[in-house]
Amino acid sequence: MMPQLGETVTEGTITRWMKSIGDPVERDEPLFEVSTDKVDSEVPSPAAGVLTEILVPEGETVEVGVRLAVIGDGAGSSASGGTPAVGTAEPPAPQPEPATAAPPPPPPASAPAPAPVPAPAPAETPAPAPAAGAADGNGSEPLLLSPIVRKLLAENGISESEVTGTGAGGRITREDALRVVESRRSADQTATPAPPAPAAPSAPAAPVTPAAPAMPVASAPPAPGVSMASFRRAGDQLVPFSNMRRRTAEHMVRSKATSPHAFIANEVDFEAVERVRAAWGERFKAEEGFTLTYLPFVARAAVEALRDFPLLNASVVDDSLLVHSEVNLGIAVDLSHEGLIVPVIHRAEEVTLRGVARRMRDLAERARGRQLNADDIAGGTFSITNDGPFGTYFTVPIINQPQVAILATDGIARRPVVVTQPDGSESIAIHSTGILGVSWDHRAVDGAYVSLFLARISELLSSRDWAAEL
């Protein structure tokens, strides 16, 4: 079955089968590769035996829990419980015979007239037989619908029988569903202008009547004109979304639809952090092999601030707020502009500044090398996105569901600031400053709470003894 590769992962795409039908398979031997919006993983076989059937071909996207293949013992029996695809492929053959024998009793009971009715009856019974013996059976097809396709059909009131599938084995693809949805919308838009026609005849003026039919005819072209084809010009290139890009897009849209987003930002003085980096930078790089950036400082300050503002380290569950006891800090990582992934530093409240820097480095390198596992991306309770290295000034991030807040760090630069001296006088100084912003779920907390949270982070960054953690 399609495994659960992360708490928010609902589906995956089979990218490669490592075994062919008839190949022997050992337990825990890599069986196939699956791609989700979070991670690409090799999935081991749950049992030893022979791969007798592949139910989902490469390139297909299915929900978590859907059966993907059947592993038998080589003699036609399945190695896993409840897998009729192979185990009952032979029994259906005898079943049609009783099915044909069954029709004779109904005719006498119904009289001669219903004689034609028994004919369709057997036609229904053989249907399951091919379903068990072949991959194109009606019984298995609904399970192989992509959640996107299923949602498209449900939202537009379209049944599967109305769509002709062009995918492998006649499966309905997203394009098939969109084609039917668009044609139905076009028909609806064409039918909508029709009401003006009856209104025209009610008017005495004859010229109005011909004008009404002319409008629907003129409005018919605009309907397809709204489709993507109308926007394409010579030389344009259509770039299909990759699986990761599509999943990222779906997750972002779902988040905006789920949470009432709000945003607050503060300018933060990083001068104290800058001095620690200047004093410890070379030694740190010599010992760890990488540069000490601003991000670990921001992460540590955020984790400490969450101790005082725990309602931001939480998730909305039904009509309640689930406040987490551990801070599992997610760090957004860009995958060469192909998509984003958010690996997690688990129990970040137990890790020092140096430890946070190490874990960030490790997770980012493994993320870009596609070496993360399901545990590395599961369980996040609060996230940080860092556009600072690109010199950004203001970033408004989207919440990483099911969390309720995400912190954005932007570019840090040398700027003139007003400094208050110990005697109360003021002067102009050049400090390293930057913007920190928080997008939060307004169902969970209000603006005052988030403002104080940001103020606490700012206070920690400017006053904490960071050198002690190095």
Image: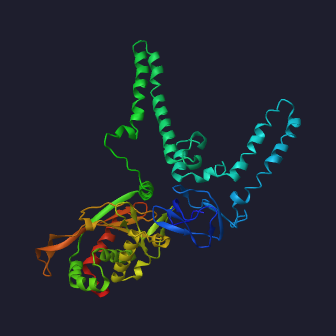
Residue 204, above or below 83: above
Q: Is residue 122 left or right of residue 24?
A: right
Residue 354, above or below 446: below
Residue 149: percent from the left, percent from the top? 53, 49
Give 57 or 182, whichever is nearer the viewer.
57
For the C terminus, the quadrant is bottom left
The residue positioned farthest toward the right in the image shown: 108
Q: Residue at x 51, y 51 (%)?
A: 148
Q: How many marks?
A: 0
Q: Residue at x 54, y 68 (%)?
A: 43
**Residue 318 visible, this angle:** no
Q: Is the image coloured rainbow, by chain, by secondary structure, or in one colour?
A: rainbow
Q: Is residue 359 left or right of residue 187?
A: left
**Residue 166 visible, this angle:** yes
Residue 402: percent from the left, percent from the top? 46, 64
Residue 115: percent from the left, percent from the top? 83, 33
For the N terminus, the quadrant is bottom right
Q: Residue at x 20, y 77 (%)?
A: 271
Q: Residue at x 21, y 71 (%)?
A: 433
Residue 125: percent from the left, percent from the top? 76, 45
Q: Is residue 4 left or right of residue 250?
A: right
Give 382 or 456, whichever is nearer the viewer.
382
